[in-house]
Image (cartoon, rainbow, N blue to C red):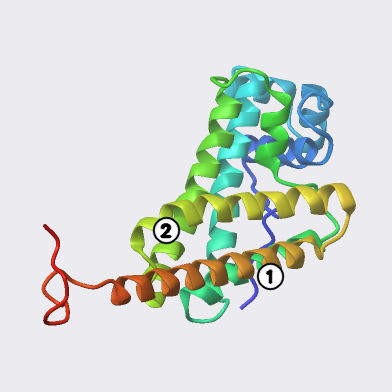
Amino acid sequence: MATQNPTESAASGSARERLLDAAEALIYAGGIHATGVDAIVKQSGTARKSFYTHFESKDALVAAALERRDERWMNWFITGTLQQGKTAREHLLGMFDVLRDWFASEDFHGCAFLNAAGEIASAEDPIRIVAREHKARLLAFVRTQCDEYAAESGMDARHAAGLSRQWLILLDGAIGVALVSGEADAALDAQTAAEALLDAESAGESSESRKTRAKPRANDRRPGAPQPD
């Protein structure tokens, strides 16, 4: 079953929801600083009074719109990922197929959360906090898949945390390259790098396992062999 594109949102009759829809669409396409309250109010079809009724400032509206987008984007990404095969490896690599479909859409303008964070200087600004929390949620989901991959492949579970952080960099890197280059296949390039990363992890585990098996034990020396002092 097809999943909703992360840039799509359901139309709502309430003034608050229409303001959120308008803010998200305009800011995602043009940026926070380039989008004024008047433009948001006009596109929402609400009165300016409605804006001040529901939000204390433009930044509060932007933060609320991003929080709503975070929920929708994560649901879309998780659902799409879990449809990519049955194993954790298929899910991890399938993440890039999910991203490629998004990159190929006409209204792809990169990661809304990275875009927003890039416009806001203060790390403690509510907008930056929403962006940071979104990436934490994405990393947590990737970590669950890395934990499952470790269990399936026999990889040392301690490596899952590092692998998940590297995976997030590949995901965000693909998004950034696709935005700048306009090439949806940036997702496939990242997927190739990701597959090499998994293969390297597997090769490393196999090598370590062989070393462990080959290491002689203290009570396993040949009779008559010199013993340590």
Task: Identify which residue, 73 or 200, lies in the foreground.
Answer: 200
Residue at (65% x, 22% y) in the render: 59
Q: Is residue 27 left or right of residue 155?
A: right
Crowd class of label 1 (few under 14; some 14 to 19; many from 20; radius 10 Å): many
Rendered-image quadrant of the C terminus: bottom left
Image position, residue 195 (x, y; %): 62, 70
Image position, residue 29 (x, y; %): 82, 41
**On screen, residue 126 above or below 94:** above
Q: Is residue 2 left or right of residue 108?
A: left
Residue tagged 2:
160
Image position, residue 81 (x, y; %): 56, 68
Residue tagged 1:
97
Task: Name the disc covering residue 133, or none.
Answer: none
User: Disc 1 and disc 2: Cα gap in Å?
Assistant: 22 Å
Residue 171 placement: quadrant:
bottom right
Task: Identify which residue, 69 or 218, lies in the foreground.
Answer: 218
Q: Amino acid at mark 1?
A: Asp
Task: Identify which residue, 205 or 109, lies in the foreground.
Answer: 205
Disc 1 is placed on an element classified as helix
Residue 131 placement: quadrant:
top right
Residue at (36% x, 71% y) in the render: 211
* In this view, the mark in front (1 or 2): 2
Image position, residue 206 (x, y; %): 43, 75
Q: Amino acid at mark 2?
A: Ala
